[in-house]
Image (cartoon, helix red, strand yellow):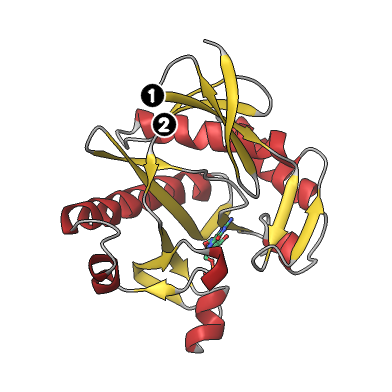
Amino acid sequence: MEKREKLYEGKAKIIYATDEPDKVIAHYKDAATAFDAVKKATIKGKGVLNNTIASFFFQMLNERGIPTHFIKKLSDREMLIYRVEIIPVEVVVRNIAAGSIVKRLGIPKNTKFEPPLVEFYLKNDELHDPIICEQHIYAMNLAKPEEVAQMKELALKVNEILKEFMEKQGVILVDFKLEFGRKDGKILLADEISPDTCRFWDAKTGESLDKDRFRFDLGDLIEGYKKILEKIEKNQ
Ligand code: 5GP
């Protein structure tokens, strides 16, 4: 398999073509951004940690029957994935109130959501990823009802798998964001699952072990991400 031209560069990853039309390479960068890239930094080693953590989670989900774009980890910073057409809807699952829902709706931080909440956001940086409802998805023709039903079902299954697994590592899965893509008429879990896209709290201390460290200056980002990696690596 040969690495070819750059296809797309996002805030945290670069996508390269390969000599196989249905496979691409995701390269994880050291860039950290928050608040629509108003806050930016280069954090040495972040890309390696996220590629390693995301590869672990995707592999685990593949093994548990969740269809994902992940094929294999290629190197420290790169994974081989299926080329998909990304659906421009971010799916957020929340087990505990934190972040934007606390600000937007005034729900007290730490409120437990049983069953978990599933929310949709429009993936559009210029509009600051606004929250949307299912009807907006259909009105804007972003996805079909069967696709939305699948995304919801998959998001809740991912939540069950990750929440249970992280609980065993002494980590609370507070919330996370997923993106999905289409390949050959099927929906695959795409993008990344890492401390950049999940809120992880240490069950004993309540310490944030995720991107909130960068967003709100809660401590060294690498230290938090390394703690997540160390905990999950014990299970390899
Ligand atoms: P909130 O809506 O509270 O800001 O985010 C909820 C969860 O989804 C958090 O775990 C957060 O990291 C993740 N999330 C939501 N939107 C984005 C996004 O645009 N980029 C990243 N990396 N994570 C997001």
Residue 131 x, y percent position in the rendering: 43, 74
Res 189 quadrant in image:
top left
Q: Earlier in the sequence, mark 2 or mark 1?
A: 1
Residue 119 x, y percent position in the rendering: 37, 68
Asked if residue 208 shows in the view, the reply is no
Task: Name the residue beneath numbered marker 1.
Answer: 22
Residue closest to the eye, 1 or 79: 1
Count of picture labels: 2
**SS for callout 1:** loop
Q: Quadrant of ligand 1?
A: bottom right
Task: Name the residue beneath numbered marker 2.
Answer: 83
Residue 204 x, y percent position in the rendering: 65, 59
Residue closest to the eye, 55 or 121: 121
Asked if residue 220 shows in the view, the reply is yes
User: Circle 2: is it few (<14), some (14-19), or many (20+) Cα within 10 Å?
Assistant: many
Against 108, residue 197 (above or below) is: above
Residue 108 x, y percent position in the rendering: 53, 85
Name the amino acid, label 2.
Answer: Arg
**SS for callout 2:** loop
User: Mark 2 and 1 residues: CB-CB less than 8 Å, in contact?
Assistant: yes
Residue closest to the eye, 144 or 167: 144
Res 6 quadrant in image:
top right
Against 105, residue 232 (above or below) is: above
Against 92, residue 49 (above or below) is: above
- Is 90 placed left or right of 139 in the picture? right
- Is 90 placed left or right of 108 in the picture? left
